[in-house]
Amino acid sequence: MGIYSKIGKSRTYLVAAKKTMKIVAFFCISGIRHKHDNEFPFLPTVEIIGFGIDKDLHGSGLGRKFLEHIIKRERKLGVKIISVMAIPSAVGFYKNFGFEEADPKMEIHCDDENFNCTPMYIMI
Ligand SMILES: CC(C)(COP(=O)(O)OP(=O)(O)OC[C@H]1O[C@@H](n2cnc3c(N)ncnc32)[C@H](O)[C@@H]1OP(=O)(O)O)[C@@H](O)C(=O)NCCC(=O)NCCS
């Protein structure tokens, strides 16, 4: 989450189980400017810069629930593109929701922290 949280450009959400108050999920969203294409060079875009579900609950549908929540909420706010730097083991998860591998000309940022990740995006 590095630079975005340092400059106050990200929103982090923690989700706790009602009974135990144990954190079961978190996600972090940042407003950002990616190039899109020549026709619409810049569209309102957010990037998922953190997303995780409690290991014990993987495969329980929580990832779907919160990714659908993010998409619905950002669409309501007028966002047109959601991007993510997907770690190798999560590429299939995002593809499952219609995320595509991004063209390098979208200039999705890459730094030391995410150099082995796949830049992906979805139009919403
Ligand atoms: C990736 C992650 C968020 C998925 O959450 P989850 O709760 O386990 O996923 P769900 O049970 O909601 O699965 C939703 C759908 O995605 C599929 N899916 C889940 N993980 C997948 C994966 N790694 N590859 C391909 N498909 C995957 C499921 O089969 C399911 O498909 P279906 O609805 O068609 O049956 C979770 O495994 C996680 O926190 N991983 C570690 C952190 C991480 O990788 N974060 C992403 C960083 S970019």
Image (cartoon, grey):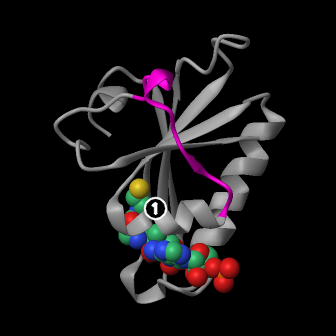
Closer to the camera in the image, 5 or 92: 92
Residue behind mark 1: 91
Q: Residue at x 32, y 40 (%)?
A: 1
Q: Residue at x 67, y 51 (%)?
A: 70
Based on the picture, tell me whether residue 56 belongs to the magenta stretch.
Answer: no
- Number of marks present in the image shown: 1
Based on the picture, tell me whether residue 99 belongs to the magenta stretch.
Answer: yes
Q: Is residue 22 above or below residue 80?
A: below
Q: Is residue 120 visible?
A: yes
Q: Is residue 23 visible?
A: no
Q: Residue at x 43, y 23 (%)?
A: 107
Coordinates of residue 90 in the picture (x, y in percent): 43, 65
Coordinates of residue 122 in the picture (x, y in percent): 65, 44
Residue that sits furthest to the right in the current view: 76
Answer left or right for 24 relative to 75: left
Q: Is residue 81 above or below residue 20?
A: above
Q: Quadrant of residue 2?
A: top left
Q: Secondary structure at mark 1?
A: helix
Coordinates of residue 42 in the picture (x, y in percent): 64, 13
Closer to the camera in the image, 97 or 12: 97
Q: Is mark 1 within 8 Å of ligand 1?
A: yes
Coordinates of residue 111 in the picture (x, y in percent): 23, 32
**Residue neighbourhood size for the residue with mark 1, other residues' Cα within 10 Å, grouped as few (<14), some (14–19), many (≥20):** some
Answer left or right for 46 relative to 84: right
Quadrant in the picture for the C terminus: top right
Q: Is residue 45 above or below residue 41?
A: below
Amino acid at pointer 1: Val
Residue that sits furthest to the left in the current view: 112
Closer to the camera in the image, 70 or 124: 124
Magenta residues?
97-108
Q: Residue at x 53, y 86 (%)?
A: 59
